[in-house]
Image (cartoon, helix red, strand yellow):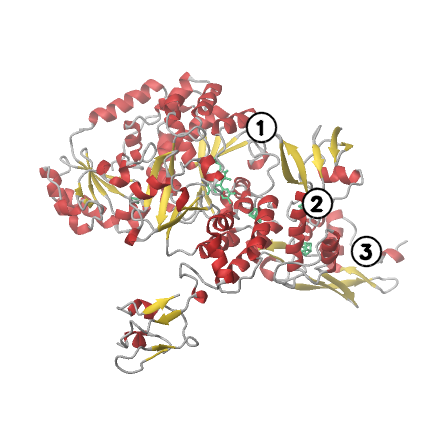
């Protein structure tokens, strides 16, 4: 894109005039091919598609007829690389480089490439438009919805959609107290895990004594499998920045940091570009929009430890110290970064702010439940047909998310549990699928909102094994400072390993419960105090599975290798010998034609290959 | 001065002091392992947990870090506190089953045996040695390396430290005696849980006894700007 001369905007009128000129220069009927350039699609070779489109348009001399826009992630990564043709919103999925010429010529003629449309697995019908795809239909995409209309490296796209109008409004029409009041009234609660009321946090920070106040955006996102913050930062960095500038003005801060994990290079890049462009436009830096308010933002790249997302550890890390939590008896809003009042919010929390200011707290608080307002983005993964990012109104049921949006469980398997809240969230069973999803309900059933991870498990998941997996993760991520978390999680891991390997003893469940209670109650930071959730919830809802492992040395889901026995069903086995050849340790012996084979339990390593190769279900797994 | 109640007793304390300090002033016992009055509190062993009433809820806090406040009501012993302390001791006892200090404290807190598999360590990673070395001695020769369960007390990269002066303050402050410390002839040996170092001792010009590490004496001379011969004699032979 050619470098334009940008003029620093020095009044709200100049901002509106620029916005008007951007919109007027655009031809709204001109087709625009939008290609997802998010990390998910790039991993699926979206770059070939992007280069393909650029080349094709140029070779055919279509620059005046068709626009191209590289956007952030709209959420349906499962089907990537995604291409959406605007203004109609025709959705092409799993697009490859070689599909490009066909899409271009169809687009120019106003036709549709049928074979690239999404097929609804339930009805078998092709679906043309993005908003008709079931995955999107039940979502409410207040935050992610704009992603496909925005090239994140192009501030003009954000401006065209009304960007920075909220900032202009607060700077010239609202006092800091009014902004805080509005945010409080909206009911916005922090999306980083704790669900703390954002307006209250801002107010406390504003009132705290200090030489200066710091504003921080938490984009550490250490939950494995979660990528909502990444997608917002990559796809719509200006919405986050605008939220931060509004917050800084309300709180009275002049310096800000975006703390991004190092593994998010595209988020870092797009945030950097966004900062530069806002500075060029006079929307960041000195005397913002001529209001006299100064605010700068710097990016800091985090080392990537999970615990560095915790507020005090994050601030220690920003100061260049070891990223270890400290006790928070003096809150960071009073003494945070370099001992000064510091306001830390999550990426998604910040992105909600411009919406609230633009549309008003009353509008915002219409979405959601009594105690949880607005939408929440979840990353839906695991044993689910449509994995991806979903943004839903608070209060939607788990069932709707999993079945209507997620498309249910693949392979006709039965649903078993869903784990919400990241590694230290809890596992919620089928009987609670109608639970409305909000902060308080999830806590009530022993799980939590966390930052929005959602992992679906089917009947083939062993809940003891799942608990072991999460405890193993947390054990590895514990900073190791305090005794209950460091020593306690290690012991928990050992006990769970023993149970899954057939060494479980009577009393282990009770010991786990006692240990959980102490780790929860006495750990120094929230990593430790939430870490027992996976164990406590699996005991609470799947106690029989623990008992089967401990008493009967049996894994009901057939996952724990040490507890599985493979047997030959003598009725069914005709002695074909397929398994005899397949067994890697020669544990199965051929006994002659029409005679069942014999499996030697002593030699069997429980690899399960015989079970997989037998076409007659004559190998039994127990 | 503020007035607070600890276990029903009214107690006066200086503003800015911690509950633990206030309790000790009043001879109220709270067990600790990672606390020492000479260094910044750390909050890692969690044995000093007490209950404070806040917003109508009883909250567990580390008394070595929590500051006193007017009207604060503190309990240093309750069913809840005791069961947490016991579990912490069970965990420490499993880590250091052969350590006398840990055995004694466990017994004192009502823990005779642990439910967990035994290891054989001496160090509980309280970081007292690290803090003393940094804050009191001022050299930062040792640190806690690695994260989580792999955490260990050691010199950087487990190499002999070139800033360590061999003063032995770490050994002195260690609550479990995990740091070995011995003068044999003209050499001092310091044996940390994961590595060790030797130091040449200086010979007293008068009595001929080896009395302190060369490095330590040089460090003090440099820091206090003393004359190079300030430590030619041992304290006993100095006039
Ligand atoms: C172990 C641990 C990890 C955390 N990781 C994150 C994270 O990756 N991103 C985040 O926004 N908050 C994280 N948090 C929560 C933060 O401490 C903090 O509460 C949050 O950033 C505040 O923002 P909010 O009020 O907007 O939610 C973590 C907390 C803990 C205890
Ligand atoms: S709870 Fe875990 S992560 Fe938090 S301070 Fe303690 S050891 Fe570190
Ligand atoms: S060596 Fe002693 S003082 Fe140092 S961390 Fe270990 S137990 Fe604490
Ligand atoms: S990255 Fe393209 S849809 Fe998510
Ligand atoms: S003495 Fe307070 S936590 Fe160790």
Please name which of the two marks, 2 or 1, marks the residue nearer to the observer: 2
Q: Report the side of A19 relative to A417 (left or right).
A: left
The residue marked by circle 1 belongs to what chain?
A: A
> Alpha-carbon neighbours of circle 3 within 10 Å: few (<14), some, or many (≥20)?
many
- The residue depicted at 40 percent of the width and 77 percent of the height is A600
As measured in the structure, the alpha-carbon distance from the residue carrying label 1 to the one carrying label 3 is: 47 Å
Which residue position is annotated with label 2? B39
Q: Secondary structure at mark 3?
A: loop
Q: Nearer the observer, disc 2 or disc 3?
A: 2
Q: Is residue A396 above or below residue A283?
A: below
For mark 2, does the 10 Å Cα neighbourhood hold few (<14), some (14 to 19), or many (20 or more) residues? some
Q: Is residue A451 left or right of residue A30?
A: right
Instruction: Mark yes or no: residue A193 visible.
Output: no
Looking at this view, is A394 or A331 the one in front? A394
Name the residue tied to disc 1.
A211
* Residue A335 in the image, given as x and y percentages of width and height: 59, 33
Looking at the picture, how far across and down is residue B167, in whole percent? 74, 56
Task: Please check whether the numbered discs 1 and 3 fall on a single chain.
Answer: no
Label 3 sits on residue: B231
């Amino acid at each position: 894109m050619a470098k334009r001369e940008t003029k620093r905007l020095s009044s709200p009128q100049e901002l509106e005039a620029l916005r008007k000129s951007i919109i007027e220069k655009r031809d709204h009927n001109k087709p625009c091919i939008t290609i997802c350039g998010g990390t998910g699609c790039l991993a699926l070779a979206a770059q070939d598609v992007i280069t393909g489109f650029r080349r094709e348009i140029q070779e055919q001399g279509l620059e005046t007829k068709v626009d191209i826009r590289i956007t952030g992630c709209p959420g349906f990564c499962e089907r990537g690389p995604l291409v959406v043709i605007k203004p109609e919103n025709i959705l092409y999925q799993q697009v490859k480089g070689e599909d490009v010429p066909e899409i271009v010529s169809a687009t120019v003629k106003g036709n549709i490439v049928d074979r690239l449309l999404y097929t609804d697995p339930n009805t078998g019908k092709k679906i043309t438009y993005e908003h008709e795809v079931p995955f999107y239909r039940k979502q409410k995409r207040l935050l992610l919805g704009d992603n496909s209309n925005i090239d994140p490296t192009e501030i003009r796209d954000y401006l065209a959609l009304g960007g920075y109008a909220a900032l202009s409004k607060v700077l010239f029409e609202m006092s800091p107290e009014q902004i805080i009041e509005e945010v409080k009234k909206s009911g916005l609660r922090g999306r980083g895990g704790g669900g703390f009321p954002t307006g209250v946090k801002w107010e406390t920070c504003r009132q705290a004594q200090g030489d200066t106040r710091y504003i921080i955006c938490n984009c550490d996102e250490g939950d494995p499998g979660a990528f909502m913050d990444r997608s917002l930062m990559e796809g719509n960095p200006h919405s986050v920045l605008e939220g931060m500038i509004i917050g800084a003005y309300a709180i009275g801060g002049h310096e800000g940091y975006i703390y991004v994990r190092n593994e998010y290079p595209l988020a870092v890049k797009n945030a950097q570009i966004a900062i530069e462009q806002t500075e060029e436009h006079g929307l960041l830096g000195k005397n913002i929009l001529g209001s006299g308010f100064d605010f700068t933002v710097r990016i800091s790249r985090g080392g990537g430890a999970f615990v560095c997302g915790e507020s005090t550890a994050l601030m220690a890390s920003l100061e260049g110290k070891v990223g270890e939590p400290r006790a928070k008896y003096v809150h960071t809003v009073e003494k945070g970064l370099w001992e000064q009042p510091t306001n830390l919010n999550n990426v998604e929390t910040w992105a909600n702010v411009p919406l609230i200011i633009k549309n008003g707290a009353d509008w915002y608080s219409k979405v959601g439940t009594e105690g949880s307002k607005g939408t929440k983005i979840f990353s839906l993964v695991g044993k689910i047909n449509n994995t991806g990012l979903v943004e839903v109104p608070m209060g939607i049921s788990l069932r709707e998310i999993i079945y209507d949006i997620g498309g249910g469980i693949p392979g006709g398997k039965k649903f078993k549990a869903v784990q919400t809240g990241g590694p230290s969230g809890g596992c919620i069973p089928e009987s609670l699928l109608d639970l409305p999803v909000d902060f308080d309900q999830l806590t009530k059933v022993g799980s939590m909102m966390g930052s929005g991870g959602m992992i679906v498990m089917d009947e083939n998941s062993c809940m003891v094994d799942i608990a072991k997996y999460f405890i193993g993760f947390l054990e590895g991520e514990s900073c190791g400072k305090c005794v209950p978390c460091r020593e306690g999680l290690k012991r928990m891991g050992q006990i769970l390993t023993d149970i899954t390997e057939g060494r479980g003893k009577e009393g282990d469940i009770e010991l786990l419960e006692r240990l959980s209670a102490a780790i929860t109650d006495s750990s120094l930071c929230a990593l430790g105090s939430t870490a027992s959730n996976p164990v406590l919830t699996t005991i609470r809802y799947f106690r029989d599975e623990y008992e089967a492992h401990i008493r009967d040395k049996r894994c009901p889901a057939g996952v724990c290798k040490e507890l599985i026995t493979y047997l030959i069903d003598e009725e069914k086995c005709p002695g074909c010998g397929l398994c005899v050849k397949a067994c890697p340790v020669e544990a199965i012996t051929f006994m002659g034609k029409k005679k069942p084979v014999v499996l030697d339990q002593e030699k069997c390593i429980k690899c399960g290959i015989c079970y997989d190769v037998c076409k007659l279900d004559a190998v039994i797994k127990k | 001065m503020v007035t607070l109640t600890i276990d029903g007793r009214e107690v006066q304390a200086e503003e800015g002091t911690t509950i633990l300090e206030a309790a000790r002033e009043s001879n109220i016992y709270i067990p600790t392992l990672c606390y020492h009055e000479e260094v910044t509190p750390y909050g890692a062993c969690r044995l000093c947990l007490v209950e404070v009433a806040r917003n109508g809820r009883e909250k567990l806090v580390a008394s070595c870090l929590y500051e006193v406040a007017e009207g604060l009501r503190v309990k240093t012993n309750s069913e809840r506190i005791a069961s947490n302390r016991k579990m912490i001791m069970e965990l420490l006892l499993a880590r250091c089953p052969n350590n006398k200090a840990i055995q004694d404290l466990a017994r004192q807190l009502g823990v005779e045996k642990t439910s967990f598999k035994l290891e054989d360590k001496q160090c509980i990673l309280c970081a007292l040695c690290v803090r003393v070395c940094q804050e009191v001695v001022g050299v930062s020769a040792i640190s806690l390396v690695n994260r989580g369960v792999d955490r260990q007390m050691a010199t950087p990269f487990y190499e002999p430290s070139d800033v360590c002066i061999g003063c032995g303050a770490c050994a002195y402050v260690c609550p479990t005696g995990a740091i070995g410390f011995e003068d044999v002839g003209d050499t001092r040996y310091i044996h940390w849980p994961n590595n060790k170092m030797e130091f040449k001792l200086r010979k007293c010009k008068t009595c001929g006894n080896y009395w302190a590490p060369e490095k330590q004496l040089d460090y003090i001379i440099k820091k206090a700007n003393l004359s190079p011969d300030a430590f030619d004699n041992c304290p006993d032979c100095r006039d």
